[in-house]
Image (cartoon, rainbow, N blue to C red):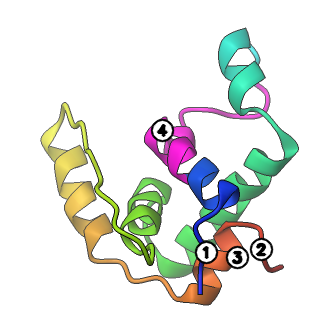
Amino acid sequence: MARRNATTSNFLVLSSKRFFSEKFNRDDLSNQKIVDVYYSKKNWGKYDRVQELASKKNVLSVQLSLAYVLNQNFLTAAVIGSGKLEHGNSSVEGEKISLTSEELDYLNLIIT
């Protein structure tokens, strides 16, 4: 079962900062503040796993990120800011995704 710890909390922060929205990429170093805060080997490892699992489940990475937050074994709330209707609709789809404890651990880099 996924455990609430620094790893889980860190993932929640990354989700909330749109790190998994494909807005960021390893080659874009133009915003030094973003690079300093988010661009680490561990975070890119989580990013890669989100991309991989989203592809396997045939969903968007942002939808999987929302599912990650909502599938925790502790109380969570997702605050969604959406400026476009399609983003809101995408969030509704993300709410429907179930993740196993193994998938949560995989996303947390707990298991390989």
- In front of the other: label 4 or label 2? 2
Where is mark 2, residue-wise?
A: 110
The part of the chain drawn in magenta is 12-27
Q: Is residue 8 above or below residue 57?
A: above
Q: Is residue 13 magenta?
A: yes
Residue type at numbered disc 4: Arg
Residue type at numbered disc 2: Ile
Residue visible at 77% across and 32% down?
39
- In front of the other: label 1 or label 4? 1
Q: Are marks 1 and 2 in contact (CB under 8 Å)?
A: yes
Taking 23 as reference, is 45 left or right? right
Where is mark 3, residue-wise?
A: 106
Q: Disc 1 versus disc 2: distance between alpha carbons? A: 10 Å
Residue visible at 26% across and 45% down?
79
Q: Are marks 1 and 3 in contact (CB under 8 Å)?
A: no
Q: Is residue 79 magenta?
A: no
x, y percent for residue 74: 41, 72
Where is mark 1, residue-wise?
A: 3
Q: Are marks 3 and 2 in contact (CB under 8 Å)?
A: yes
Quarter containing the C terminus: bottom right
Quarter containing the N terminus: bottom right
Q: Quadrant of residue 94?
A: bottom left
Q: Secondary structure at mark 3?
A: helix
Q: Determine which of the numbered discs, if any, sits on residue 18 in the image.
A: 4
Q: Disc 4 versus disc 3: distance between alpha carbons? A: 20 Å
x, y percent for residue 5: 64, 62
Mark 2, other Cα within 10 Å: few <14 / some 14–19 / many ≥20: some
Q: Disc 4 versus disc 2: distance between alpha carbons? A: 22 Å
Q: Earlier in the sequence, mark 4 or mark 2?
A: 4
Taking 15 as reference, is 109 left or right? right
Residue visible at 34% across and 61% down?
76
